[in-house]
Amino acid sequence: MKKNQQQFQFYFELDEVNKSVPERLALENYTVFPKNNSFRNEKWISTLPLFQTQEWNTANIALVGNVKSVQAFRKVLKEKSKEIFTHKAIGLKAKKDYKTQI
């Protein structure tokens, strides 16, 4: 993304013990929110800075995380956009399979 000069922003909902992980991974352009189920609140999601500009409508958005949070975020995306988008949910079974492969 940086090589192509594309803008990007990461939103993380993390427990207190994990809130420093993005910094330790040397990520840029991220915002960490406390893990308090905010990402399950559609009204709150729609107020995120992401949705306050028109550029988001042409953005590539990757949703990763808790299924309920991803569903709420996806619903807001669908309500605010006429674009067609694809998604892939990774459930608990897939996570367990992935951990056993590592």
Image (spheres, rainbow, N blue to C red):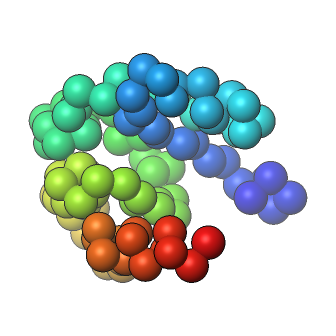
Residue 90 pos. (x, y %): 35, 72
Name which residue lies at 51% across and 29% down.
Answer: 18
Q: Is residue 45 above or below residue 75?
A: above
Please indicate whether residue 30 sits to the left or right of residue 67 in the image. right
Q: Is residue 94 above or below residue 92?
A: below
Residue 37 pos. (x, y %): 20, 34
Q: Is residue 67 visible?
A: yes
Q: Quadrant of residue 63?
A: bottom left
Please indicate whether residue 46 sits to the left or right of residue 99 in the image. left
Report the number of discs. 0
Residue 74 pos. (x, y %): 25, 60
Seen from this angle, which residue lies furthest right? 3
Q: For the N terminus, which image quadrant?
A: bottom right
Residue nearest the observer in this picture, 53 or 71 = 71
Name which residue lies at 50% across and 69% down.
Answer: 99
Q: Is residue 29 above or below residue 8?
A: above
Q: Is residue 80 visible?
A: no
Residue nearest the observer in this picture, 34 or 9 = 34
Residue 49 pos. (x, y %): 40, 31
Q: Quadrant of residue 15?
A: top left
Name which residue lies at 42% across and 20% down.
Answer: 16
Name which residue lies at 14% across and 38% down.
Answer: 41
Q: For the C terminus, which image quadrant?
A: bottom right
Q: Quadrant of residue 23?
A: top right
